[in-house]
Amino acid sequence: MTDRLTIRRPDDWHLHFRDGAVMREVVPYTARQFARAIVMPNLTPPVTTTQLAAAYRDRIVAAVPEGVRFTPLMTCYLTDNTDPDDLARGAGEGVFTAAKMYPANATTNSAAGVTNVENLYPVLARMEAEGIVLCIHGEVTDHSIDVFDREKEFIERHLRGIVAVFPKLRVVFEHITTSDAVDFVMASGPQVAATITPQHLHINRNAMLVGGIQPHNYCLPVAKRETHRLALRKAATSGSPKFFLGTDSAPHLRKDKESACGCAGIFGAPYALESYVTVFDEEGALDRFEGFASLHGPAFYGLPVNEDEVTLERAEVAVPPVLHVMGEEIVPWHGGQSLGWNFLG
Ligand code: NCD
Ligand code: ZN
């Protein structure tokens, strides 16, 4: 039995840091484990220009603890009014690593998102030409579509079209939650990949709805039925370079989750690697963890892998039921549970 696992230092290919005091308190959790992270731009107001992204990047860098090496990789929030010249300039200057498409009102802080995906085609054409990666929140917002079907419907209504019209555009289908998404990614060319969160590997929708409503298991896209969770576990541990780590760590204060209208988002950063490696261990796939966590993402983005290494050991870790941000309580993913792997650094 493997009791210690040493791998290249991983990166987190999708997370939310927020801004201001919250950001300053959550960045160290990610910087403890990861060398880089793709930072989502859904602030209020959103990060829509090179100038806003450069300033946000500086604020994040200032929040990295002394002596820790961590690089935020910035994304441009695409809107109906995105200026392709500014996006291309930002990518050329190394400010933007990717651009993020939210269908308007699909999730937290997405009101400024794209109202009609096809309206964005001129921008996507420019991104394809410039080699800029497109990150997609893949859910339709049509009220007539059941919330559990919104990802599958997005594939049929929009994603197939985008991939067909822009065959060279690199697309990350983010935080996938269904076997339909796994099948779509597997059937697509090497320019299409997906991130998978720890929560979608650990829980199905029962964890959100059985025994009383469980707001700390609520995020978007929502967890689906068990068959989908099993498909995601198979994909993540398959060794396919199309799947890589993206926590979708999305901090919301406890009071904002435990509310009559609770926020969507799970704060996965503090014990992210411990959470993922547990899944790989359960699946008998520890030998494939490095690929998922540390190699497939850089290969897709065309970035070097990290030079240094991290070690995890088989040992019980108790995840605190609550952490504190700005003197307020925040519940981490797995809060109050124990995990069988410990991160040694
Ligand atoms: C994210 C957030 O809170 O910003 N929430 C979530 O449930 N995942 C937004 C997102 O990635 O959808
Ligand atoms: Zn997200």
Image (cartoon, helix red, strand yellow):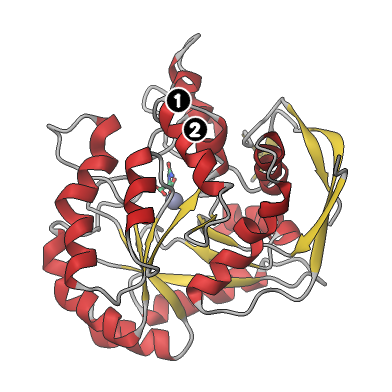
Q: Secondary structure at mark 1?
A: helix
Other residues around mark 1 within 10 Å, as few (<14) / some (14–19) / many (≥20) = some
In the figure, is residue 31 to the left or right of 41? right
Quote the CA–CA distance across marks 1 and 2.
6 Å
Q: Position of residue 92 (x, y in %)?
A: 41, 90
Q: Kindly identify which residue carries mark 1.
A: 226
Rendered image: mark on residue 230: 2
- Which residue is drawn at the image coordinates 70% and 74% (left, top)? 306
> Type of residue at label 1?
Glu
Q: Position of residue 282 (x, y in %)?
A: 69, 34
In the figure, is residue 35 to the left or right of 95? right
In the figure, is residue 342 to the left or right of 233? right
Nearer the observer, 38 or 235: 235
Asked if the residue under mark 2 is in contact with the one under mark 1, i.e. CB atoms within 8 Å, the reply is yes
Decide: is 318 above or below 29. above
> Type of residue at label 2?
Leu
Other residues around mark 2 within 10 Å, as few (<14) / some (14–19) / many (≥20) = some
On-image quarter of the C terminus: bottom right
Q: Quadrant of residue 143?
A: top left
Nearer the observer, 340 or 228: 228
- Which residue is drawn at the image coordinates 39% and 47% (left, top)? 182
